[in-house]
Amino acid sequence: MSKFNRMLARMLRPSDSLPVVPSLHPYNFLLQLQPLLQQGRHALDDNPSRHVLTEVALTAYLMGMGFDYRPAKAIVDTWETDDALLNEGLLEK
């Protein structure tokens, strides 16, 4: 086997195909979402499930975009007062 083929084989091994990034580990992801999941679970007692699931999904999306929990939640809360979103039925109060 040539030097190039050995190098190529080493580069294409399944264990080496994806870099190990600690922040992408499911444990870290779930740890970051823990406050959101707890808030959503408690909100289900007093609010319609569609409203709670929409709020949790939007907040999780913003967290995935790099926002921390509190700023993401604040942004979603401002969206809940947007008359255009409410009138079109995209969000519920």
Image (spheres, helix red, strand yellow):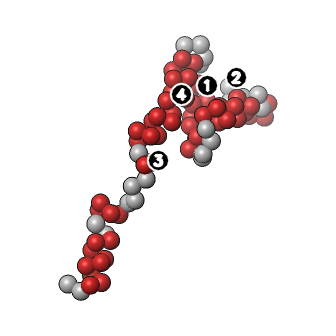
Q: Are marks 2 and 1 in contact (CB under 8 Å)?
A: yes
Q: Is residue 76 left or right of residue 20?
A: right
Lower sequence index among marks 2 and 3: 3
- The residue at 72%/33% (across/down) is 79
Residue type marked 2: Lys
Residue type marked 1: His
Rendering quarter of residue 85:
top right
- The residue at 46%/47% (across/down) is 23
The residue beneath circle 1 is: 51
State which mark lies toward you, 2 or 3. 3
- The residue at 60%/45% (across/down) is 66
Residue 23: mark in rendering: 3
Rendering quarter of residue 16:
bottom left
- The residue at 55%/13% (across/down) is 45
Note whether 24 is above or below 44 in the view shown.
below
Lower sequence index among marks 3 and 1: 3
Task: Indicate the secondary structure of the residue bearing disc 4.
Answer: helix
Q: Is residue 12 left or right of residue 33?
A: left
Q: Bin the neighbour count of mark 4 within 10 Å (Cα to Cα): few under 14, some 14-19, many 20 and up.
A: few
Q: Disc 2 versus disc 1: distance between alpha carbons? A: 7 Å
Task: Indicate the secondary structure of the residue bearing disc 1.
Answer: helix
The residue beneath circle 2 is: 93
Residue type marked 4: Pro
Q: Quadrant of the N terminus?
A: bottom left
Note whether 42 is above or below 65 in the view shown.
above
Q: Disc 4 versus disc 2: distance between alpha carbons? A: 21 Å
